[in-house]
Image: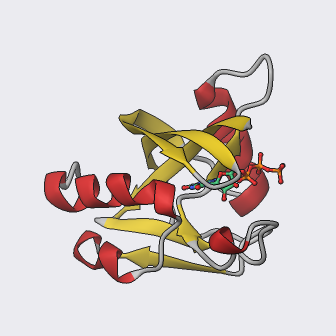
Amino acid sequence: MKNLQVVAAIIIYQGKILCVQRGRHEFDYLSDKFEFPGGKVESGETGEEALIREIKEELSMDIRIDSLFCTVEHQYPDFFIELNCFICRVSSYRHTLHVHQQSAWMDPGLLAELDWAEADLPAVYQLIVEKPF
Ligand SMILES: Nc1nc2c([nH]c(=O)n2[C@@H]2O[C@H](COP(=O)(O)OP(=O)(O)OP(=O)(O)O)[C@@H](O)[C@H]2O)c(=O)[nH]1
């Protein structure tokens, strides 16, 4: 079974968090789910390098990575994922969606209202409880 190393950006601007919604995914259980932007770490890259590249590709945004917030290990029916979530900062709310169908700057207290990818739920609940910003 596939084992994916994925990095994700919890992008904070003026107290809100950028949440993005996928379109269709090859596995139905991930179609239309909300996630933190990011993607797979390619060979030869550090997690931080991968995250900066992914956010530029997906959103045309330049992030500053602050710190590693949490690591979630999750078994989906078709693959295993290690999801490393980093707190990131930006100097503008502006972004362009190149991959996702929708985005929203969310108040942390409202994060649980979105329909998240299952692997993200521990990170979402930890954000709601710890409010690291
Ligand atoms: N980016 C991201 N992917 C997540 C999160 N949670 C989660 O389960 N995933 C899953 O992890 C996998 C990451 O792959 P991806 O498709 O974003 O990565 P990528 O941009 O490198 O993919 P590609 O170039 O193969 O299209 C997807 O299956 C995605 O559904 C998350 O918060 N952020």
Viewer-side residue, 13 vs 32: 32
Residue 104 percent coordinates (x, y) = 50, 79
Q: Is residue 63 visible?
A: yes
Quarter of the image where the N terminus is located: top right
Please tell me which residue is depicted at 64% across the width and 55% down the height of the picture: 77
Q: Which of the 4 image quadrants contains residue 109?
A: bottom left
Q: Which percent across, then down, holds residue 5?
A: 64, 34
Observer-nearest of 41 and 28? 28
Does 33 appear above or below 74?
below
- When asked about the image quadrant of residue 17, the answer is bottom left
Residue 106 lies, in percent from the top left, at 38, 76
Residue under the point 77% across and 69% down: 25
Along the horizontal axis of the image, is 121 left or right of 107? right
Relative side of 29 to 123, left or right? right
Q: Residue sitting at 44 percent across and 53 percent down?
A: 10
Q: Which residue reaches farthest left? A: 129
The residue lying furthest to the top in this view is 44
Q: How many marks?
A: 0
